Image (cartoon, helix red, strand yellow):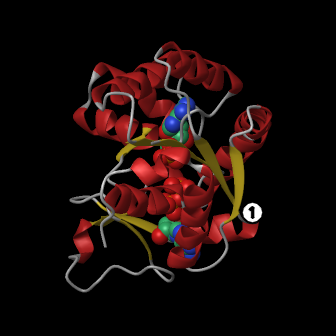
Amino acid sequence: MRLALFGPPGVGKGTQAKLLVHRLKLKHISTGDLIRSAIKLNTSVGKEARSFVRAGELVPGPIVRKLAEDAMTECGIDYFILDGYPRTIEQADWTTEFLDGHNAPLEAVLSISVSDEVIVSRLSKRRINRETGEIYHLDFNPPPNSVPPDSLVQRKDDRPEAIRQRLQVYRNQTFPVEDYFERQGILHRIDGLGDIEVVYGRLMSVIVSHVKSFGKSRQLQD
Ligand code: ADP
Ligand code: AMP
């Protein structure tokens, strides 16, 4: 099964990807997570990417292309869900070219949307468990008491000025990618408003009815 989650920052892609990955046994390929991990490890990719991420700008395409293609290759170009890639028309072309070259096209692009106000309210109170990578929201999905408060961190790009910039970048460079996949006939729009499990149910019903390989997917969990 080859899926992509699409939508603006803060819409809930990472949250939904973690549920889908666990229950459908897919590999989660988040270019944002891969870049943050490179920054933390201070690799050459991390050094090059750091200032772009902090400013809410896109990291140069060739860097993310390599991260995404290596990750897809690692899982045998199947059973994965892309999260945050592709994010430009150029990246979408690379993705199509790469996957077609392996005779393994994307089966569905699930585009989640909510209003800008909801995005800002979700991002401004997002917290990440630095140990596990678990995503929380101080009001909507609060961390359990077992999570020590000093494990919870706010992403540097979740500051108001970086959030504004990321939304602008999304509108200008990423939103047109929706049309690109619509023309390929694999785009599905999902309302992202509502509880996490409600949104998950919407995603699953699209997967069940439109993704042919679903029936062949590995055993469901939970
Ligand atoms: P993205 O990966 O699209 O940037 P995240 O999955 O990190 O978004 O979610 C952004 C924030 O919104 C997080 O704090 C998360 O806990 C919260 N969130 C995600 N889905 C929902 C939802 N359906 N309702 C309320 N808050 C949500
Ligand atoms: P995310 O975790 O998806 O919100 O991504 C965080 C940041 O990583 C983005 O604001 C960009 O700076 C960078 N990034 C992630 N994915 C990409 C991509 N596909 N292209 C360019 N930059 C990216």
Q: Quadrant of the N terminus?
A: top left
Which residue is farthest bottom? 145
Q: Residue at x 67, y 45 (%)?
A: 165
In the rendered image, residue 96, in percent from the top left (x then y), is placed at 60, 22
Rendered view: 68 above or below 55: above
Q: Is residue 158 visible?
A: no
Whether residue 12 is visible:
yes
Q: Is residue 72 left or right of residue 196?
A: left
State left or right for residue 157 relative to residue 136: right
Identity of the amino acid at label 1?
Asp
Residue 194 x %, y %: 63, 79
The residue at 45%/56% (across/down) is 17
Q: Residue at x 67, y 73 (%)?
A: 193
Asked whether mark 1 lies closer than 8 Å to ligand 1, one says no
Residue situated in front as seen by the camera: 32 or 148: 32
Q: Nearer the viewer, residue 49 or 189?
A: 189
Where does residue 169 sit, x and y in percent of width and height?
A: 70, 39
| 168 or 159: nearer the viewer | 168
- Count numbered badges in the picture: 1
SS type, badge 1: helix
Check the image and report above or below for 69 versus 174. Answer: above
Task: In this rendered view, identify the residue nearer to me: 7 or 137.
Answer: 7
Q: In the visual, does 156 lie left or right of 46?
A: right
Mark 1 Cα shell of 10 Å, populated few (<14), some (14-19), many (≥20): some
Image quarter of residue 76: top left
Mark 1, residue position? 116
Q: Could you say where residue 136 lies in the image, as x and y percent from the top left?
A: 41, 71
Q: Residue sitting at 56 percent across and 80 percent down? A: 195
Q: Residue farthest to the front?
A: 215
Quarter of the view holding residue 61: top right
State which quarter of the image contains the C terminus.
bottom left
